[in-house]
Amino acid sequence: MTEDQKDLLEEARDSISAADLLLTGGFPGYAVSRAYYAMFYIAEAFLEGLGLSFSKHSAVIAAFGQHFAQTGKVPAEFHRFLLEAFELRHKGDYGLRHAIAYDQAQEQIARARGFLELAEKLIGPLPPMNKERS
């Protein structure tokens, strides 16, 4: 695991924690956004392992699908999860106040958690979470 991959996966882990807090606080739209960003950071970490980086979200999503889902390196469902999370994030960020239901946010957080577990198996495990934030 490169240092950049480690940083991205730690950002993903932090985003999942933030999503949990937001959902508990009654903010499912914001929770969906953090869950999406967790998945996005994970996709970036996978691509970093190939020496690839992109400036647009759509390019990261497409490249992840091309290099990992279509090749069978990861189950294709994770690409679908990323695509669905991207759509829900947009709905949560720009839609009406109650555009995202609690159970939708809960599902996205669970998917992000599963995506992180997959990344830790394929890229490498993260060190335990540091109680003090830097």
Image: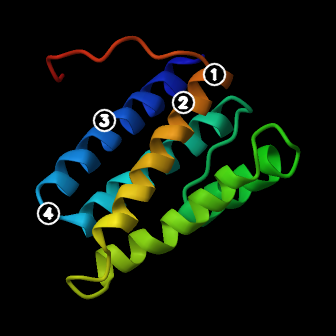
Q: Is residue 105 left or right of residue 54?
A: left
Q: Nearer the viewer, mark 4 or mark 1?
A: 4
**Pointer 3 or 2: first along the chain:** 3
Q: Is residue 128 left or right of residue 80?
A: left
Q: Is residue 40 left or right of residue 43?
A: left
> Eyeballing the image, is 67 above or below 60?
above
- Dot 2 corresponds to which residue? 117
Identify the element where label 1 is drawn. helix
Q: Nearer the viewer, mark 3 or mark 4?
A: 4
Give the crowd class for mark 4: few <14, some 14-19, many >=20 residues within 10 Å: few
Measure the alpha-carbon separation of dots 4 and 2. Answer: 26 Å
Of residue 97 and residue 65, the one placed in the foreground of this image is 97
What amino acid type is highlighted by mark number 3?
A: Asp
Measure the alpha-carbon separation of dots 1 and 3. Answer: 18 Å
What amino acid type is highlighted by mark number 1?
A: Lys
Give the crowd class for mark 2: few <14, some 14-19, many >=20 residues within 10 Å: some
Measure the alpha-carbon separation of dots 3 and 4. Answer: 19 Å
- Dot 1 corresponds to which residue? 121
- Dot 3 corresponds to which residue? 14
Residue 26 has which mark? 4
> Eyeballing the image, is 15 above or below 10?
below
**Pointer 4 or 1: first along the chain:** 4
What amino acid type is highlighted by mark number 2?
A: Glu
What amino acid type is highlighted by mark number 4?
A: Gly
